[in-house]
Amino acid sequence: MSLTRETCAGHGAASDRRAFAPPGTPAQYPPDRLADIRHIRLDLEVVPEKRSLKGVATHFLTPLGRPLSRMVFDLCELTVDAVRVDGKVAPFHHEGGRLEVTLKPAAPLGREVRVEIAYHGSPRTGLNFTGPDRDYPDRPHQAWSQGQDEYARFWFPCHDFPNQKSTTEVVCGAPEKYQVVSNGRLVSSVKKGRRRVWHWLQEVPHVAYLVTLVVGEFEHWSDDVGGLPVEYYVPPGRRADGERAFSRTPEMIQVFADFTGQPYPYARYAQVVVRDFTWGGMENTTATTLIDYVVHDERAALDYGTTAARLVSHELAHQWFGDYLTCREWAHAWLNEGFASYFETLWLEHAGGYEAAQQARLEDAAAYFAEDGEYRRPIVSRSYVEPHSLFDRHLYEKGAWVLWMLRQTVGDDLFRRGVQEYVARHRAGLVKTEDLQRAFEDVTGRSLGWFFDQWVYGTGHPELEVSYRWDDARKVGDLRVKQTQKVDQTADQAPRGPREGGTHVFRAPLVVAFGQAGGAPALREVEIGVDGQAESGFSFALPKRPTWVRFDRQNRLLKTLKFERAEELLRAQLAEDEFTGRVEAARQLGENGSPAAIAALTAALRRDPAWGVRAEAARALGATRTEAAKQALIAALGGGAATTEARVRTAAATALAAFRGDGEVAAALTAALDDASYYAAAAAARSLGRIRAASSLDGLRRALTLDSHRDVIRATALDGLASLRDATVLPEILELARPGWFSRLRAAALLQAANLARNLPPEQRTPAREAAEAALFDPLYFVRRGAIQALVVLGDAAAVGPLRALLARDVEGAVRGECRVAIETLLRGTGREAEIRNLRDEVERLSQAETALRERVAKLEPAAGGRAKGGAKRAGAAKRPAKPARARR
């Protein structure tokens, strides 16, 4: 599953961090399995126009541990019509999201049992329906599933946890005009009257959340990779845009197969693009579902092409890591998401070279650091309220960085061999972090407990202060390194097993580099944190006085770094070091702001071969706010041979926001609204508002008329409007929060209305608050999330009531989690600590009740009462909208 990559919040101070899970949150463990479910067959009828689902789920299972007298399935918000065991009617009880089936007589060990469950309903999640309405008249009728984390239970009865793998088949009838896509290979597609019945068979076992069903009208074509069908399903008329997004999928398959030593393990691979999807993508076995804006036009490809490639490669990598090898429990979900995120950079390294992969790692580190400023947690954590909350930047970006650091620790060759051993040992199986550690230790001969304890079971990262001194008489460079992070777990107290530790003194191998005039840099390998010491000192004999000094060459360590050096050293580093060193030097030179620093940054902006360095130079120049920097940025925004990269122009436009009230900058930004890149034009719109020039409002109003990929220009123009701090534009912002516009634009409008209103007198904030409260119950997932964020920005504790109402009724995990955080934030702002404690107590009671229910089920204790319809439990996530009725998408 892929998160959409959005701008992250700022890095807060440690004292400002909230708890990841409320105090007292109980540890979560996998539920017991009463039987091994060998195979699941779903016979379904789906009518998207009616939002209706009718089905029979047949489970073929054998008892585990003891004879089976009662079988329990997860099933929420659907009506059970009948249950049969081996063809005979069986008693059942459906309550609280659990379906208990009585077996009379009990099935003995070793005997296969067939349990058939007939049911129907109109799911709120799990299987999602889209279709036209008054506000979105051209939205297509579709039905698509989203099972992760525990939402499969909302559309078919199952053991809805990743500690059970089964083969599956889906036989689905739908109106004849629709295509039906599911897992595995297509057995048959038979027309029956005005219906067509599709039969799909998945012959390699997988977990319930990976079972997929998509019903809709698509343009469909396929490739072939050594006999493997590779299929594509996109909205009608979008094939060219789909080919732009997916054309390198066959090459990706080969690269990943070669690296893992495991050929693609299934009968075929498909990518299906749907409307209003809830994530960037979801790695359903053999048939990934993707958000609709992954298909993009030629203009969007200037910036978005790399993002699309990361999304496509991420979901493909899951076919190995997440589908073929699946985390045994959610606490270890980084084995799914961290690997898929790392394989994004593996693909970029293959397709775009070392610098492309390093650029992605820099972006991933920034995303993780931003989240770490909000809360800190171990990657492996059982303390969570809902599984959804684990799917964060710690799981994805930090997880990918852990694998990058493991590669640096053992070396490229042993890293690849370790991955191949891990995959080979656990083919089609269930895994925990210990399995990965054991495979690497067996291949490398290294004891790696320290690595996994500090990075996976521990929290945080090293926060380093480094000093350097050159002793010319001795021809020696001296380095002092101090880890300044607050340590609450010392090395000798590190957890010995898969339990949660605190922040360590970090042990890390890395490379120190010294520039040598006229030659290659001198490289020295060192290790910090040895024996748990927070301070380390190193002395290096060198043939020449260094022209520059680099700590952690190639950026092998996830860290924050304070390393003050003379400007001359930084300028030389910017000119001579490898990619990440040049980025580091540009950032620090921007803090200096001397004429020589500005000249060096301008030269890098014009001539550095890597667009990432040129973009960093642009950002650094903006921080200096000098006339020379301004002219360099205007020239870069205007284009030219050295700055034709769209992402450099985007960075230049963003950096120009520092020049408040400048008419020359306003003119350049206004002209950039017509940039060939949607995203450069969008950055220009945002900066146009932030400089608050006399002409800004006119330019922003023009930006609101411009169509773009993901409506990015309008969305950032709203940011610009809010930055004007002009109360008269609030109605213009709120107009774009109304139904009919793209959901991400509506969410942005709600947030920017709040950003503007919070600086207005209380009596002028009402329209923004009322719009956000009304949007809390919008059917579109991203609109609801935007409304929650807006209410937090407004800071009005009166919103706690509506937020509690949303928490009580919403089934989407992300919405519920953000509601809890928002309520606590708003109550803390009023000093109502007692209510915060009550909220935490309520969460704890709910968790304890769920634990008790699981224990009761495991003990096979019958529930009280008669038959009942299923109740709601948790839910998943939902994404994006449709064409606006009154506006362009």
Image (cartoon, helix red, strand yellow):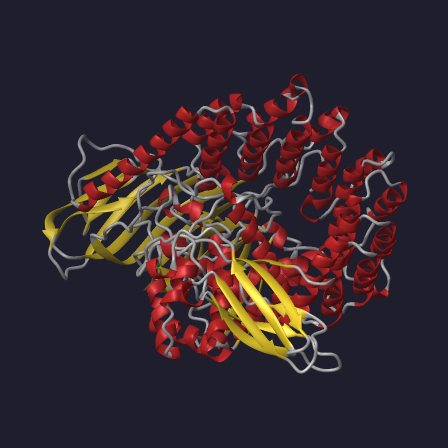
* Percent coordinates x, y for residue 73 in the rendering: 27, 46
Residue at screen point 44% across, 37% down: 124
* Percent coordinates x, y for residue 734 in the rendering: 68, 28
The answer to whether 695 is drawn above or below residue 476 in the figure is above
* Percent coordinates x, y for residue 421 in the rendering: 38, 75
Q: Can residue 547 be seen in this snapshot?
A: yes
Front residue (pair 806, 151): 806
Front residue (pair 603, 713): 603
Front residue (pair 146, 568): 568
Front residue (pair 481, 769): 481
Residue ranking furthest to the front: 473
The answer to whether 339 is drawn above or below residue 263 in the figure is above
The answer to which image quadrant residue 263 occupies is bottom left
In this rendering, would 110 be left or right of 633?
left
- Number of disc labels: 0
The answer to which image quadrant residue 437 occupies is bottom left
The answer to whether 690 is drawn above or below residue 420 in the figure is above
